[in-house]
Image: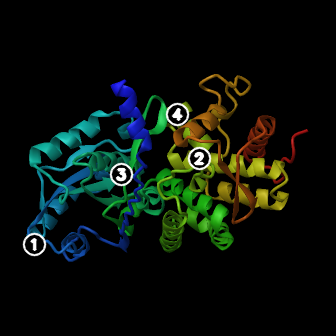
Amino acid sequence: MQMAIQQKTALNLQPINQCVRVTFNYDVYFTKGLFQLDNPLLAEVIAADGEITPKQVLAVVDGGFLQSQDGLLKKLSAYAQRYEDVLTLSGEPIVVPGGEAVKNDSRFIEQIHQQINASGLCRHSYVLAIGGGAVLDMAGYAATTAHRGIRLLRVPTTVLGQNDSGVGVKNGINAFGKKNFLGTFMPPYAVLNDFDVLTSLDDRDWRSGIAEAVKVALIKDADFFNFIMTNADKLANRDMDIMERLIYRCSQLHLEHIAGSGDPFEMGSSRPLDFGHWAAHKLEHLTNYSLRHGEAVAIGIALDTTYSYLTGQLLQSEWQRVLTTLKKLGFTLYVSALTEQLDQLEHPHCIFRGLTEFREHLGGKLTITLLQGIGEGIEVNHVDLSLYKDAILMLQGWELYKLGGQDAHPTRVN
């Protein structure tokens, strides 16, 4: 009886409605020679909070990048000494593997957490993450889960990091065979893009990040896509001036979407900036991450563009422009993982499992972005798998034509 009275009383109480508004401000900087002693940018960013005492900074460095940057750790140490009134390095930098391997092993998260704890870093301290997109994702996840968030400074060292993943609000690692299963939404304190570091990239990493620029151009900015298409040969030949312009515009479009979409932390069912990614994420896993993220994204873009053409939303000439541009940039648009177990929808190696995992990652109903024109994305909630199979076979045929040196392009599958 007493329990019933208590329940009734509780039911008569009106709910307390609360709205918490949080504003995040962060800047994305573009520079050259970030760790040169005469470049005060990093120190100025740290000093901008107006607090007097030198701040502790824990550096996390991409081991792959370190191999191409002779003396980087000494430069970091010298920089900290030069600006010792602003920052102090918290112990030796933590060097971690580059690439997706760093997101597949939780021990690296634990290593960073242990160093944060041992060094007494607080929420006014900094984690300085230097590396490619995967290292930034992992280090960002570690930083944002220690003390519920230590300030994160990102120094992206790849094209993909500078124009896409490094400027956004996501952090994460892989788990259970799924891309970014564990992660957080937390904007960085600042992003510092150093164009000089791009000269040391191999051709695959140089090219890989261009895929994200193609992606955002296709769904948001036809003029930007035309710029990429017109300069595809120059980009493939590593024209730095064109690359700098590409990175800047791509970053700008990403940041405009994050700030202006009304859903920066993806609380709904839509991820328009992940055009081409449902297949890309699955392909990375199916190839045991032998595909770079951008390489997988290029295939995903080609697949969703082809499907958009087959549904009648995209002109054949537009479809061909997209695939031709991707090929000029140097991308392969078909890998055998696309057709393995293609008719076994429940098989874990079927590419269409990527659709299910894409929906599960966000929740709600399946929502993917397709094209209804160059620069015009459209969201759909249902797809025709038989038509997607045709799209995959068309990509396979396209690659065969290209390998054979043919100029003709395969058209619709009968």
User: Which residue is at the front of the view, 36 or 315?
Assistant: 315
Labelled disc at residue 277: 2
Q: Measure the alpha-carbon separation of dots 4 and 3.
A: 19 Å
Please give the residue where the numbered disc 1 appears in the rendered image.
52
Quadrant that contains the N terminus: top left
Q: Is residue 199 above or below residue 171?
A: below
**Marks 2 & 4, CB-CB < 8 Å contact:** no
Q: Is residue 214 visible?
A: yes
Q: Amino acid at mark 4?
A: His
Res 326 quadrant in image: bottom right
- First in sequence, mark 2 or 3: give its number: 3
- First in sequence, mark 2 or 4: give its number: 2
- First in sequence, mark 2 or 1: give its number: 1
Q: Measure the alpha-carbon separation of dots 2 and 1.
A: 44 Å
Q: Amino acid at mark 3?
A: Leu
Labelled disc at residue 21: none
Please give the residue where the numbered disc 3 appears in the rendered image.
136
Q: Measure the alpha-carbon separation of dots 2 and 3.
A: 19 Å
The residue depicted at 65 percent of the width and 67 percent of the height is 225
- First in sequence, mark 4 or 3: give its number: 3
Would residue 334 be found to the left or right of residue 387 on screen? Answer: left
Please tell me whether mark 4 sits on a helix, a strand or a loop.
helix
- First in sequence, mark 3 or 1: give its number: 1
Please tell me whether mark 2 sits on a helix, a strand or a loop.
helix
**1 vs 4, front mark:** 1
Q: Amino acid at mark 1?
A: Ile
Residue 190 in the image, given as x and y percentages of width and height: 32, 66
Quadrant that contains the C terminus: top right
Q: Amino acid at mark 2?
A: His
Please tell me whether mark 1 sits on a helix, a strand or a loop.
loop
Please give the residue where the numbered disc 4 appears in the rendered image.
285
